[in-house]
Structure formats: C-alpha cells, structure tokens
Image (spheres, grey):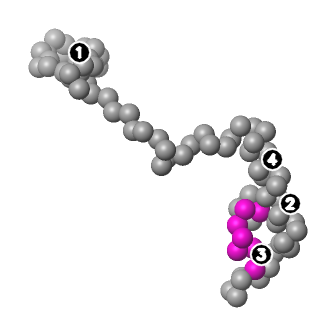
Amino acid sequence: MIGRIIKNEIYLGTDFYPRLIDDETFARAQEIRNYNAKSQNRLGLYRPEKQIPKTFCFKIGKVEKKYDDPYLQAQYTYSQIGEDNDE
C-alpha cells in the first residue's frame, strides 16, 4: 500500500482527495524508487509494446490408441507432438 501512495500523484491532493504527502517528500520518494529500480536492474525488463510475439507451430498426426490406461495414452500422445518446420 505504501508503494501505491508514493508513486500515485493523487495523494498530493486534488479537489476530491485530501493531501496525504507533501511535494518534497513525494519527489524524494520518486528518486529513491528510481534509484532502487536502476540498482536492482528492474528498468526496461518488460515493455510489451516493444516485445515481438514469438509463435510456435506444432504438428501431430493421427495418434493410434496403444494403451487402455488414459495416463499412458496421454503420455504416448504427447510424445508424438513435433515442431512444424514448414512455418
């Protein structure tokens, strides 16, 4: 909850919300948060707009029934899955 307060400008006060933190404390908290993020290498790790989606194509032919036990049959079926290199 404290993390939400120190990064949300609404807690500086609006017409609707009372001021919970002063400008100087808020600015210092942002500096500390940025320093911690940089020092822990948490900046730029996840940027969905820059991610290129990776797709995988798999193929499986007709699978014959080899086992009455559904777990063994499933294991056999999964072993028949291979990559589709045509894509």
On residue 80, the disc is 1
**Mark 3 sits on what residue?**
12
User: Which is more N-terminal, label 4 or label 3?
Assistant: 3
Residue 87, image x, y percentages: 23, 26
Question: In the rendered view, does 2 fall on the left or right side of 22?
Answer: left
Residue 47, image x, y percentages: 54, 46
Q: Is residue 18 above or below residue 11?
A: below
Residue 36, image x, y percentages: 79, 45
Extent of the magenta region: 6-13
Give the label, 1 or 4, closer to the camera. 4
Tag 1: amino acid: Gln
Give the label, 3 or 4, closer to the camera. 4
Tag 2: amino acid: Arg
Would residue 70 be visible to someone looking at this image? Answer: no
User: Which is more N-terminal, label 1 or label 2?
Assistant: 2
Circle 1 SS class: loop
Q: Residue at x 24, y 19 (%)?
A: 85
